[in-house]
Image (cartoon, grey):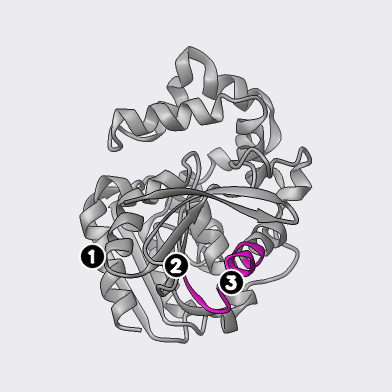
Amino acid sequence: MIDHISIPTEAGSFDAIAAGPEDGRPVLLLHGFPEAAVEWEHQVATLGVLGFRAVAPDQRGYSPDVRPEQASDYSIDHLVGDVVTITEALGWPKFDLVGHDWGGAVAWWTADAHPERLRSLAVVSTPHPAALAEAMKTDEDQHLRTRYLTEWRQTRVTERRMLENDGRALRDMFERRVSPSKVDDYVQRLSEPGALTAALNWYRAGRPAGKIGKIAVPTLYVWSTEDVSFGSTAALDTANWVTGPYRFEMLEDVTHWAPEEAPEAVTSLLVEHLHAR
């Protein structure tokens, strides 16, 4: 039902999972940290059965063939550029874009920079970047939720700490809400030489050079009440940063790992969103 494919680009070949007919309506799904494309396997498989062409790539740093060494090579401009490059390689002039966690941030920035390429946008967990930035400045709760960013950006000791004791720190991030086999897979991937540093370089690349604006494409935003990273202030303020058709859905008693913890709920919302467009 799910195929493993390689997407050749000028940056290198991106590994990906895919499902559905080649001529199906294209949907690109972007994973977060510390996951990989397989976080979307339930959504990709279901979309494929429904006739969509769903593709989820292992993004820059996660695909072994696209793993530059410099932190600056993981700036938001490069990450958005990868979305454009991947979809061009797939022959998709227009597509639906889905993202979670860091993949959600890339999705927001892509919708801002290339609205003409998107049929729709769906983001899980990650609020609009401007809403998040404001909440980090004005909301003590959000500031506390994201204080780990300082450590991850400034020290390479983070890699050793995350991987010691069979990746205990990485495993603990998932709050026992993701299947052990999937967590084993993620830890194994990030234990490869250079892989975890590449993933953390997303945090170390520095702030975006420009400012993000309001999003005009039809948008679905899904936030979970038990999300440890993103509080309600930024989640609720995201509505003020979308000018196009907007739908906000709240998942009760679900954590940050919604695509895997509540796959049926997330998939159902995504399918409804896509069918409405």
Q: Which mark is residue 268?
A: 1
Provide the residue span drawn in magenta. Answer: 84-97
Q: Are marks 2 and 3 in contact (CB under 8 Å)?
A: no
Earlier-in-chain disc, 2 versus 3? 2
The kind of secondary structure element at disc 2 is: loop
The kind of secondary structure element at disc 3 is: loop
Q: Quadrant of residue 249?
A: bottom left
Q: Which mark is residue 127?
A: none
- Taking the spot 64% from the left edge, 37% from the top edge, the residue there is 64
Q: Position of residue 171 (x, y in %)?
A: 40, 27
Question: Would residue 89 be counted in the magenta stretch?
Answer: yes
Residue position marked by numbered label 3 in the rendering: 91
Residue 210 drawn above or below residue 196: below
Residue position marked by numbered label 2 in the rendering: 22
Q: Position of residue 80 (x, y in %)?
A: 64, 63
Q: How dense is the environment of label 3, judged by Cα within 10 Å: few (below 14), some, or many (20 and up)? A: few
**Gap between marks 3 and 1, in whole Å?**
27 Å
- Taking the spot 65% from the left edge, 57% from the top edge, the residue there is 79
Q: Amino acid under label 3?
A: Gly
Q: Position of residue 96 (x, y in %)?
A: 45, 73
**Gap between marks 1 and 2, in whole Å?**
22 Å
